[in-house]
Image (spheres, rainbow, N blue to C red):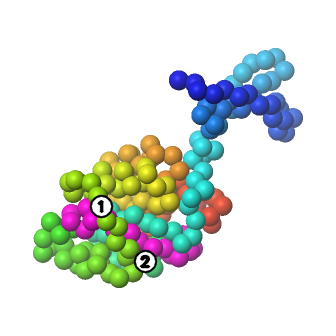
Amino acid sequence: MVVCIRPQQLNLHGFRFRVILRRKQCVHVVKVSRNWCIRKKRVCGVNMYNTQLGPPYHILVDTNFINFSIKAKLDLVQSMMDCLYAKCIPCITDCVMAEIEKLGQKYRVALRIAKDPRFERLPCTHKGTYADDCLVQRVTQHKCYIVATVDRDLKRRIRKIPGVPIMYISNHRYNIERMPDDYGAPRF
């Protein structure tokens, strides 16, 4: 459903472009050539820019991210700062903490890391302890977070929310996707 269409004329590199705005976000860029053949290009990234994001970064940590960090022998806070080149504040919700406690004695190292005083504890007001729903709900309400997860399903759900970067582990280091270039995060 188109709420608001405001075509604007742009002149970039000698070509004329028409930008179609829907709900005040850039959706399509239409290239108009001399013989009026129109090519549409979906703009991905223009509407994903998040102005609430900035250092010090608040990073919502998922249970499996802590477990995979332990397996890869990575210090969470130091590796996050190495990835983002800025101060990072890891945040753990009550649901994630409850999920780690349910895992039992096998994951006591993860529980000890989660109780680190450098981690910020975020209280949950909803019912239930399903951590993925909690993280998605919190990121939808407040887009000032980066989500750190290795879970494919959670990544897929978060990719549907515009403007939320995802931190993940690959090749024994942290990487980030969908981070704006202005913030200095390296692209690999």
Up the image or down, 35 lies above or below 58; here it is above
Q: Quadrant of the C terminus?
A: bottom right
Q: Position of residue 94 (x, y in %)?
A: 27, 65
| Quadrant of the image occupied by residue 51 | bottom right
Q: Which type of secondary structure does the marked residue at label 1 adopt? A: loop
The span picked out in magenta is 81-99
Amino acid at the residue labelled 1: Cys
Q: What residue is drawn where x is 31% and y is 65%?
A: 123
Nearest the viewer among 119 and 176 is 119
Q: Position of residue 134 (x, y in %)?
A: 31, 54
Residue 140 visible in the shown view: yes
Circle on res. 124: 1
Q: What residue is drawn where x is 60% and y is 51%?
A: 49
Nearest the viewer among 59 and 110 is 59
Label 1 and label 2: CA atoms lie apart by 23 Å
Q: What residue is drawn where x is 63% and y is 37%?
A: 24
Q: Which type of secondary structure does the marked residue at label 2 adopt? A: helix
| Quadrant of the image occupied by residue 66 | bottom left
Is residue 134 shown in magenta? no
- The residue at which mark 2 appears reads as 77
Q: Left of 123 or right of it: where is 42? A: right
**Which callout, 1 or 2, points to the residue nearer the camera?**
1
Amino acid at the residue labelled 2: Val
Is residue 90 shown in magenta? yes
Residue that sits furthest to the right in the current view: 14
Q: Position of residue 127 (x, y in %)?
A: 22, 53
Up the image or down, 53 lies above or below 78; here it is above
